[in-house]
C-alpha cells in the first residue's frame, strides 16, 4: 500500500492497523526517515509518484515473501525532527522483512519522483544512493 | 504534448508546465531538449548539463534517446532526492 500525503503519520498506529487480526505475520520491520537540522520542502510529480512507488512495492512483493507492505511519503514543508517517510514490511520470518525494507528504501531514493529543497537550495542526489540501488540488480 | 518541469529545472525555465506542438523532426527526448534549448535562455540554462537531466514519458522513466512516439506528457527533472 502506498500513501503520498502532507499529513504526519504515527508509526504505532500504522503497525497496529497492518497487523490487526493477522495470524500469518511473524516479523514486522519499519524504517522511518526524519528531517535533521534544516527545514525541508518536498515536491513531487503527482501521478508518477504513486505509480513509481506502486511499481517498487510490486517488485519487492515479487522478490520477497511479504504478507504486507506499506510506504508513506510526506510532501510539503517539514521541520527538523518531523517524519518524512515510513516503510513497513511484514512477513512470516524476519529475513524477507529486513531485506525488502532495505530494497524499498534504496529504490525509493533513486526512482520515486520527489525533490528536496533546504530553504532555497535544492538537495543534490548522491552517488551512494545509486550504488545502494545497484546492488539489488 | 504537455511538458512538465520540476524542481531546479522549473525554476530556470520559469514555469511548471506548458503545451507544445512539436515539428516532425523532433523524434526522441534528445531532439526535444535541442528544440527547447533553441527557444530561450531559461531553457538553455536548465538543460546545460545533460548528465543531470532525467526524463519521463507518460510518467515512466525514459532515457534521453527514448522515442517520443505518441506521448501525451513528457516531464523533465533533476535526479530524484526523496526518501
Image (tube, coloured by chain):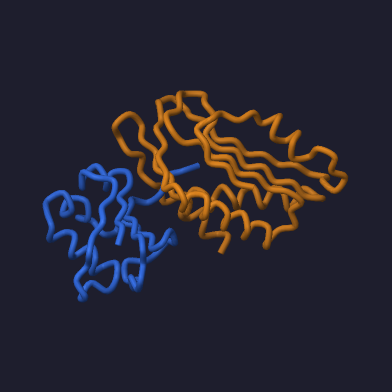
Query: Residue at position x 23%, y 60% from top?
Result: B20
> Dividing the picture into quarters, in which one does residue A120 lie?
top left
> Dividing the picture into quarters, in which one does residue B53 lie?
bottom left
Q: How many marks?
A: 0
Q: Where A58 sits versus A41, above or below?
A: below
Percent position (x, y) of residue B39?
13, 57
Q: In this view of the protein, can residue A136 be seen by the observer?
A: yes
Q: Which colour is chain A painted?
A: orange
Q: Is residue B51 left or right of residue A10?
A: left
Which of these two is toward me, B39 or A36?
B39
Q: Is residue A134 left or right of residue B30?
A: right
Query: Residue at position x 24%, y 42% from top?
Result: B11
Percent position (x, y) of residue A29?
71, 41
Which of these two is toward me, B53 or A37?
B53
Query: Residue at position x 40%, y 26% from top?
Result: A39
| Chain letter, colour blue | B
Percent position (x, y) of residue A40?
41, 30
Query: Residue at position x 43%, y 33% from top?
Result: A76
Q: Residue furthest right?
A: A23
Q: The C terminus of chain A appears in which quarter of the rendering?
A: bottom right
Percent position (x, y) of residue B81?
42, 45
> Dividing the picture into quarters, in which one does residue A32 lie?
top right
Q: In this view of the protein, can residue A110 be seen by the observer?
A: no
Amino acid at each position: 500500500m502506498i500513501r503520498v500525503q502532507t499529513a504526519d503519520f504515527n508509526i504505532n498506529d500504522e503497525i497496529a492497523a497492518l497487523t490487526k487480526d493477522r495470524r500469518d505475520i511473524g516479523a514486522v520491520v519499519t524504517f522511518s526517515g526524519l528531517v535533521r537540522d534544516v527545514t525541508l520542502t518536498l515536491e513531487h510529480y503527482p501521478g508518477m509518484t504513486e505509480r513509481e512507488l506502486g511499481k517498487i512495492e510490486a517488485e519487492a512483493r515479487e522478490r520477497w515473501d511479504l504478507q504486507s507492505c506499506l510506504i508513506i511519503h510526506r510532501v510539503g514543508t517539514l521541520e527538523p525532527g518531523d517524519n518524512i517517510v515510513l516503510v513497513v514490511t511484514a512477513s512470516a520470518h524476519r529475513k524477507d522483512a529486513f531485506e525488502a525494507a532495505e530494497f524499498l528504501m534504496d529504490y525509493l531514493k533513486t526512482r520515486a519522483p520527489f525533490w528536496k529543497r533546504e530553504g532555497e537550495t535544492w538537495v543534490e542526489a548522491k552517488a551512494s544512493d545509486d550504488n545502494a540501488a545497484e546492488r539489488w540488480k | 504534448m504537455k511538458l512538465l518541469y520540476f524542481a531546479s529545472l522549473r525554476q530556470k525555465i520559469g514555469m511548471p508546465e506548458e503545451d507544445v506542438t512539436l515539428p516532425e523532426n523532433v523524434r526522441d527526448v534528445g531532439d526535444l531538449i535541442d528544440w527547447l534549448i533553441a527557444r530561450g535562455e531559461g531553457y538553455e540554462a536548465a538543460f546545460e548539463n545533460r548528465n543531470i537531466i532525467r526524463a519521463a514519458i507518460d510518467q515512466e522513466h525514459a532515457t534521453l534517446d527514448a522515442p517520443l512516439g505518441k506521448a501525451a506528457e513528457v516531464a523533465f527533472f533533476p535526479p530524484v532526492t526523496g526518501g
